[in-house]
Amino acid sequence: MKEKRYIVYALFVVFLLTAPLYLNRYWLEVLNSVGLYAILGLSLNIIVGYGGMFHMGHAAFYAIGAYTTAIISTSYGVPVLWLMPLSGLTAGVFALVVARPIIHLRGDYLLIVTIGLVEIVRIALINNVFGITGGANGIFGIPRPTLFGYKIFKSHQFLYLIWGCVAVTVFFFYRLENSRFGRALVYLKEDEIAAEGSGVHTARYKLAAFVLGAFWAGMVGTLFAAKMTIISPESFSFWESVLYFMIVILGGSGNIAGVILGAFLVIGLPEFFRGLENYRLLMFGAAMIFMMIFRTQGILPPRQKVFDVSRFRKGGEPI
Amino acid sequence: MEEFFQQLTNGLAVGGIYALIALGYTMVYGVLKLINFAHGDLFTIGAYLGLTLLTSMSLMDSLGVFFGLLLLVLMVMGLVGLIGVLLDQIAYKPLRQSPRLSAVVSALGASIVFQNAVMLIYGARFQVYPQDILPRIVINIFGMPVPLIRIMILMASIFMMGALYFFIQRTKVGTAIRAAAEDQGAARLMGIDVNRVIMLVFLIGPALGGAAGLMVGLYYGQINFTMGWIYGLKAFTAAILGGIGNIPGAMVGGILLGVIEALGAAYISIAWKDAIAFFVLILILIFRPTGLLGERVAEKI
Amino acid sequence: MILKLSNLTKRFGGLTAVDRVSFDVEEQTVMGLIGPNGAGKTTIFNLITGNYKPDEGEIVFQGQSIGGVWTNKIVMLGIARTFQTIRLFQNLSALENVLAGCHCRMKSGPIGAMLKTPGQKQEELWALEHAMKQLQFVGLADRAELLSGNLSYGNQRLLEIARALATNPRLLILDEPAGGMNEQETEALIELIFKMRDSGLTVLLIEHDMGLVMKACNRLVVVEYGKKIAEGTPEEIQADSRVIEAYLGIDEEE
């Protein structure tokens, strides 16, 4: 069983590595887009999947990262990829400031407030707040990224860059999931009072989940800005947030593989039905209702954690 | 002064519309503790159905303006109410025993379905209401001109709210609704058919929302498939502002929000008009989550 | 003296749920809190564990005033609890439930976890061992990998105790630990309570099973309508006419 899973993972990696050999530019771009959404989904998964907080304003953090990159790279000529940590940091600090007063709100209230948040950010961007966001037209002329002296501009180059970032994210988040921090988030999702009663500082962990999720989304913002070379407020609407949310909920909230599968389903699958593009959201809406009724945990729900406890038992018997 | 007066009456009319939509949120929340995210889209459906009925049936010609409009409103309310009941039966009823947030996700899914269904049927472009339905009369109040439609909308929403208030407070069925909102289990033990109450709530709330959609069509003259989303959020803000689950609260909250928004747009900045409601929402949830007329409830451990 | 309540008062609206209650808990003893349903026992527990903030009065734990301090801080200071309505993490294994208790005795954060620093690795190993020890202590080591929701009622109560023990408490608060247990399980629970006391713990418990209360507790406090009406050894309480009238008499008729 376990081996079967790893065979699927290995085949998937081989597919991504060799994709440029048999996929045309169009399909490579689809893969790139799936990759970006996969990282966004994984960053939202920390908040929604592990922490169980219904957050629908993730596009706000993504936007702040993308705009940070766009503004600094176009006005000061800093190489784009160097701006990743800074963009993450800006989004993280923003999350810290805005999430602090609302973090204690109950599930559905938090949901509606985060929707308000992403709308306010979008309206602020359109209104050219501080005179640096370029209003409704956004910012253009963002330079292409360079990596080890190579300029990245072709689809397959972006494929490796983006999916490399996905790999790094999976590597780190897998460790996070299996740590004190990751467990604490799951505890507070399961039962906040019991978590607090077991010594988990629930308010701090909720905030930390928001900040970490926002930090990661901000870094994806850099990738997005560098890939698009032009960004505008319409890329960061509430409906974007709904897409990330669907990726997490449909794929399997709290499960890394599930979220990546979710990104393929929500972003990749519709590409096979180009003629039915207008029906895409309709189908997703119906799928959300359907999933909630028949499979609340998503397609790939999290598996039970396995710990190696044999060493704490003597000769098979409990110590 | 005139500017202020115009903005005030405009705010009151829009506030009446918010209040009508807010009633649907607050009634459903009262009984099911669910934010019905699809409610805003039922409002949109009301606007579109109104347009279809208006252009296809020429009610005004045969019945005259008053009775034509009355029949139109009743038909829209009935149809949207029916859709509301269907929505509950399909998307929410199977989730009564599930965690609360599952139903919220389902509601969001339903909202997406409705919105895109309207787009597929009517197209993505703005639709225009016929301009010659209502005679363009301007009347003078305190020496200042106010369009008749503004007054009519305010009067109509006040009338509907009054009727609902009477129904909820004075009739037996209304008492059952209030009892089910207070404590479903106890209401069930007292012999109240809670399922019927829920069905009724999903009939009345969307009916009022549908009527509000029709009013927006008549007032602004143009409608769009996404408009339910922003109106819905604002009406929800109004419901929270008044205290969610509280019916008079939704009425007060709606009118208050309409006025705040109209005055804010006029005297602060028109560009930030849509953000004003969200700021109000966030502030109220941070500082007084039970709303202006809501009561505090202690959480049991 | 490990815990001292003085004039503790809590009101909900017009109702005074806890009314000027004072008592002391001596180190390494088992103290029982008894009284009819709705007397305010669990509210007293919630005040001690920081779930509620007292309106008046003081709670002093090991010389430190803890009234109104955050729950997680109180756990850090050494007070752990179980819940009357079992509050386990139902979808997680027994072991993961106990790991929750280890949380407050660990330090590593998200960055340490992502980088898997040597300190973090060692800490995780310590937590596993510590959690297994607690499961072993309550007799659930062989059920470590079962989902907690699938355990029997009695075992769920024991698992809650293991989770509380994992926080390394000085004072353990048990809210109706024998609720839903059969006779043998209750006997085993009494043994477990003695074992905990002998290992240096102080236990404060609410229980309706009078057999357990009389056998396991060194001292009892009786509350009714939010007020303390008696305090003493089990023998003294059994002889107290007010208590018999208010509580024990009714209980025996049942």
Image (spheres, rainbow, N blue to C red):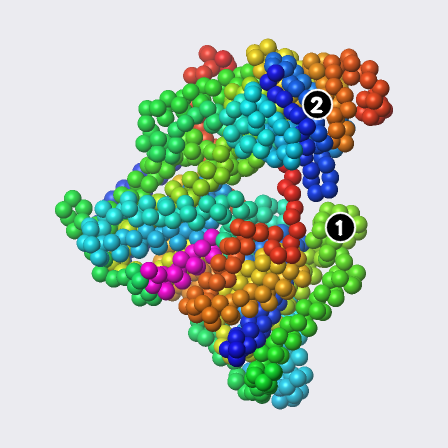
Q: Does the image show residue B273?
A: yes
Q: Is residue A123 magenta?
A: yes
Residue A43 vs C140, above or below: the answer is below
Q: Does the image show residue C83?
A: no
Name which residue lies at 51% across and 39% down: A189
Q: Is residue A146 left or right of residue C125?
A: left
Q: Which residues are magenta?
A: A114-130
Residue carrying label 2:
C33
Q: Is residue C97 magenta?
A: no
Q: Is residue C23 left or right of residue B259?
A: right
Q: Nearer the viewer, residue B60 or A123?
A: A123
Which of the 4 quarters of the picture holds residue B236? bottom right
The chain identifier of the residue carrying mark 2 reads C
The chain identifier of the residue carrying mark 1 reads B
Mark 1 crowd level (few <14, some 14–19, many ≥20, 10 Å Cα): some
Q: Nearer the viewer, residue C133 or A202?
A: A202
Give x and y (percent) for residue C176.
Answer: 68, 25
Residue C202 vs A49, above or below: the answer is above
Q: Nearer the viewer, residue B165 or B65?
A: B165
Which quarter of the rendered picture does the N terminus of chain A lie within?
top left
Give x and y (percent) for residue C185.
Answer: 67, 18
Q: Main secondary structure of the magenta part?
A: helix
Query: In the image, what residue type sits under mark 2?
Result: Leu
Residue carrying label 1:
B187
Name which residue lies at 61% across and 13% down: C28
Name which residue lies at 48% across and 25% down: C102
